[in-house]
Amino acid sequence: MNLNNIPSDLRILIDSEQTDFIIKSSRNYPRKKGLGILLFSLFWNAIISIPVVSFLVPILTGKVVNFTVNDTPTSGSLENWESILAPSLLIGLFAIIGISTFIWSLILLMQKGGYFVGTETRFIKYRNGEITVKDWEQFSGNIKINNKSKLGDLELELRTGKMKSRGKGSDKFVPDKIYISGIENVFEIEKKCRIRIKENDPTPKITTGKMYYQS
């Protein structure tokens, strides 16, 4: 892809810089990321559908629901709503989470990709008028490749991120990532990215050698 086929804002940003690559991805996120969230949402919604059908639906249709609270038989309806308020809100919250997760998975699967540009000093992403610029030194060098058929995915790991707490054990650092999904020549693009990341690696190189002593 050449400069004449990209948005004018991106062309102005690049200006006279020599580019290593200019590509357009077909998706904003890898398909497996969206599918993973989709499967989780379907499982979640299947579980929460049981109390929704057995508890909320009868209440909304004007029926009386019988249940137990701390081994005490209780009943509730729209007219006698005090006893059903707490469980209804809880079930409703879980249902909203499930529906929101399902919608988010569809968004991930259907989002169109953007433009990616690599120059000697920086990495540029342009999508829907939003521009993200990263210096090559901000990348850790950890890259994952997924290549199927003619299109492949790249997952580039950044040095930035956030700590994620775990129930048992110490907190875990989760790095930020940039996805380039659904592109041709994925191995060629990965090679060019890796070269630039190594050239701009800010960590000091450790050299080893033999030491000689004189008596």
Image (spheres, rainbow, N blue to C red):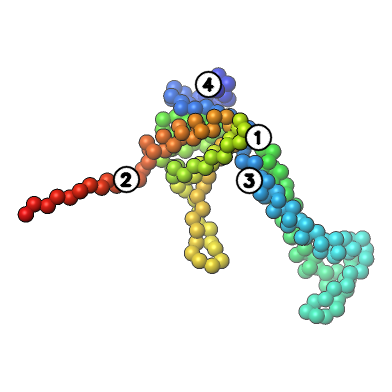
Asked whether 114 or 29 is in front, the reply is 29
**How busy is the neighbourhood of tag 1: few (under 14 within 10 Å), some, or many (20 plus)?**
some
**What is the distance, in whole Å, between disc 3 and disc 4 at their CAs?**
31 Å
Disc 3: which residue: 33
Q: Examine the image and state in which quarter residue 88 appears.
A: bottom right
Disc 1: which residue: 112
- Looking at marks 1 and 4 on the same chain, the residue that comes earlier in the sequence is marked by 4
Residue 133 can be seen, yes or no: yes
- Confirm or deny contact between disc 3 and disc 2 (CB under 8 A): no
**Disc ID at residue 147:** none
Left/right of residue 77 with respect to residue 7 in the rendered view: right
Disc 2: which residue: 204
- Looking at marks 2 and 4 on the same chain, the residue that comes earlier in the sequence is marked by 4
**How busy is the neighbourhood of tag 3: few (under 14 within 10 Å), some, or many (20 plus)?**
few
- Confirm or deny contact between disc 1 and disc 4 (CB under 8 A): no
- Looking at marks 2 and 1 on the same chain, the residue that comes earlier in the sequence is marked by 1
**What is the distance, in whole Å, between disc 1 and disc 4 at their CAs?**
20 Å
Disc 4: which residue: 3
Amino acid type, callout 2: Pro
Q: Position of residue 20 (x, y in %)?
A: 46, 27
Amino acid type, callout 3: Lys
Secondary structure beneath dot 2 equals: loop
**What is the distance, in whole Å, between disc 2 and disc 1 at their CAs?**
39 Å
Q: Position of residue 126 (x, y in %)?
A: 56, 32
Residue at the extreme left of the image, as rendered: 215
Q: Residue sitting at 73 percent across and 56 percent down?
A: 43
